[in-house]
Image (cartoon, grey):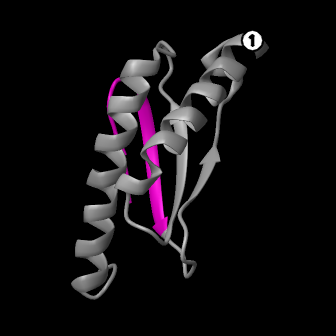
Amino acid sequence: MHAADDTLVVIVSPNSLAISRLGLAVSRKAGNAVMRNCWKRRIREAFRTTRSDFPIGLDIVVRPRKGGTPDSRLIHQSLSRLINKASKKTDSQSSSGGMTG
């Protein structure tokens, strides 16, 4: 499941591990190499400091939105909110029997 706002896009998938893992997808659309590395550092730091607030057993892929700014405060707020939102969608989908169609 995914969730997004003006700063980040988060995709969450359950894994069978006792930990949650972070993956980053920062393309050239996010800016030059310096800007992309800035995004990566700040997303990793936000994940590291809030990891205990998230459910365990998730694979989380995060990418910045085109035109977003790598503001630490905004990233921290977005990451927390979006991971919890996407994980709730994943929980509700798995409890209802998975995908339909």
The quadrant the N terminus occupies is bottom left
Q: Is residue 6 magenta?
A: yes
Residue type, label 1: Val
Q: Position of residue 54 (x, y in %)?
A: 38, 57
Q: Which residue is mark 1?
A: 34
The quadrant the C terminus occupies is bottom left
Q: Position of residue 6 (x, y in %)?
A: 34, 24
User: Along the line of sight, which residue is nearer the eye, 85 or 97?
Assistant: 85
Specify whether 10 is left or right of 34: left
Q: Is residue 25 above or below residue 85?
A: above
Q: Secondary structure at mark 1?
A: helix
Q: Residue at x 24, y 84 (%)?
A: 95
Q: Position of residue 58 (x, y in %)?
A: 49, 66
The magenta span reads 1-13
Q: Is residue 72 above or below residue 87?
A: above
The crowding category of the residue bearing disc 1, from other C-alpha atoms within 10 Å (few below 14, some 14 to 19, many at least 20), is few
The quarter of the picture where residue 45 lies is: top right
Judge whether residue 27 can be spotted in this image.
yes
Provide the major secondary structure of the magenta segment.
strand
Q: Residue at x 43, y 32 (%)?
A: 8
Q: How many marks?
A: 1
Judge whether residue 101 can be spotted in this image.
no
Q: Position of residue 66 (x, y in %)?
A: 51, 20
